[in-house]
């Protein structure tokens, strides 16, 4: 079976700065892959290229959903990329702060609903039925991430860790084949981190592939099937956790970082 996502020689320049330099990567269906590297290595830029926020300077993004032909993601707008089955969360949380928790997830569902603006105004029974279904699906997702009891709270009333879980629920509402998580454990306490790990495993049990940017190396080593390591925009290593843990180039890249950062 061909990989779900194939990235061929991706490069991204900002003026004279090459933030990503000819990086290639493959993600198979149902795999958990981590993208790690020191600060400024280009990890978030890589996500932004995959999700249509940046148009890469060079390289090819090939998407092959199960039982479907390959298609290119190059040139697609972010919402079209979401429709293809890639969803993401952000390093700096981006929930709709003045909306309720439930409404935040319902917005994620929007790309899988069919109602038009006219339908929303006239509200024929089919639109009302679809909306009920959206509410039920969104509520089920909130139960899954442990936020059902605060469904009607304003999103900005939630503590930090809960807002991160809300972002994951909103991304899941789009029915992704590949979920991209940008530092999901950042700012979480150990118990929240443990719950996050359980949640990522349960998402993956449904055969959703996960691409994870994360600085918590212990979490990465426990979760990832395969790890790619970026340094100054270049891929310096890739492999299973045991190989990456002992790779001299990776250890060198992390020298100067806290020792337990890379335990
Ligand atoms: N919009 C932009 N314009 C100019 N330079 C940028 C832009 N976005 C990123 N960069 C540069 O690209 C490089 C990679 O940044 P990026 O944020 O992707 O790194 P990162 O690995 O995600 O870092 P961190 O772990 O600190 O989040 C940095 O030198 C950064 O300053």
Image (tube, rainbow, N blue to C red):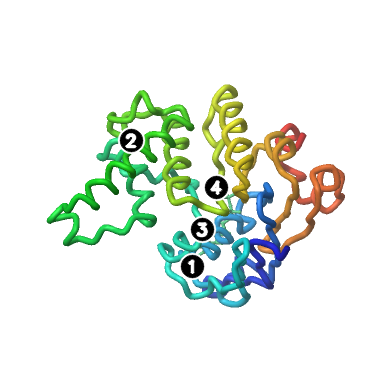
Q: Which residue is drawn at 69% across and 62% down?
A: 3
Q: Name the residue under label 2.
A: 101
> Which of the two residues, 54 or 149, is positioned nearer the viewer here?
149
Residue 22 falls left or right of residue 133: right
Pick whichever of labels 4 and 3 is earlier in the sequence: 3
Q: In the rendered view of the protein, which quadrant contains the C terminus? A: top right
| Percent coordinates x, y for residue 90 in the rendering | 47, 48
Q: Name the residue under label 1.
A: 54
Pick whichever of labels 3 and 2 is earlier in the sequence: 3
Q: Tell me the tag on residue 219.
A: none
Badge 4: residue crowd in 10 Å (few <14, some 14–19, many ≥20): many
Q: Which residue lies furthest to the bottom in this view?
A: 58
Badge 1: residue crowd in 10 Å (few <14, some 14–19, many ≥20): some
Q: Is mark 1 within 8 Å of ligand 1?
A: yes
Q: Mark 4 points at which residue?
A: 182
Q: Does the residue labelled 4 lie within 8 Å of ligand 1?
A: yes
């Amino acid at each position: 079976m061909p990989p779900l996502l194939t990235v061929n020689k991706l490069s991204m320049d900002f003026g004279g700065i090459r933030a990503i330099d000819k990086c290639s990567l493959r993600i198979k269906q149902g795999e958990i892959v981590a993208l790690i590297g020191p600060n400024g290595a280009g990890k978030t830029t890589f996500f932004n290229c995959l999700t249509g926020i940046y148009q890469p300077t060079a390289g090819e993004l090939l998407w092959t959903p199960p039982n479907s032909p390959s298609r290119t993601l190059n040139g697609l707008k972010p919402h079209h990329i979401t429709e293809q089955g890639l969803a993401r969360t952000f390093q700096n949380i981006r929930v709709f702060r003045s909306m309720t928790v439930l409404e935040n997830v319902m917005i994620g569902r929007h790309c899988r609903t069919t109602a038009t603006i006219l339908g929303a105004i006239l509200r024929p029974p089919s639109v009302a039925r679809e909306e009920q279904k959206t509410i039920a699906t969104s509520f089920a997702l909130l139960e899954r991430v442990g936020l059902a009891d605060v469904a009607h709270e304003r999103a900005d009333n939630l503590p930090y860790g809960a807002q991160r879980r809300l972002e994951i629920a909103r991304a899941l509402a789009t029915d992704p084949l590949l979920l991209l998580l940008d530092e999901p454990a950042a700012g979480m306490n150990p118990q929240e981190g443990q719950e996050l790990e359980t949640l990522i495993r349960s998402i993956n049990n449904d055969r959703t592939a996960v691409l994870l940017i994360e600085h918590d190396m212990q979490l990465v080593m426990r979760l990832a099937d395969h790890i790619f390591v970026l340094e100054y925009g270049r891929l310096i290593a890739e492999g299973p956790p045991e190989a990456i843990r002992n790779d001299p180039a990776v250890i060198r890249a992390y020298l100067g970082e806290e020792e337990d950062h890379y335990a």
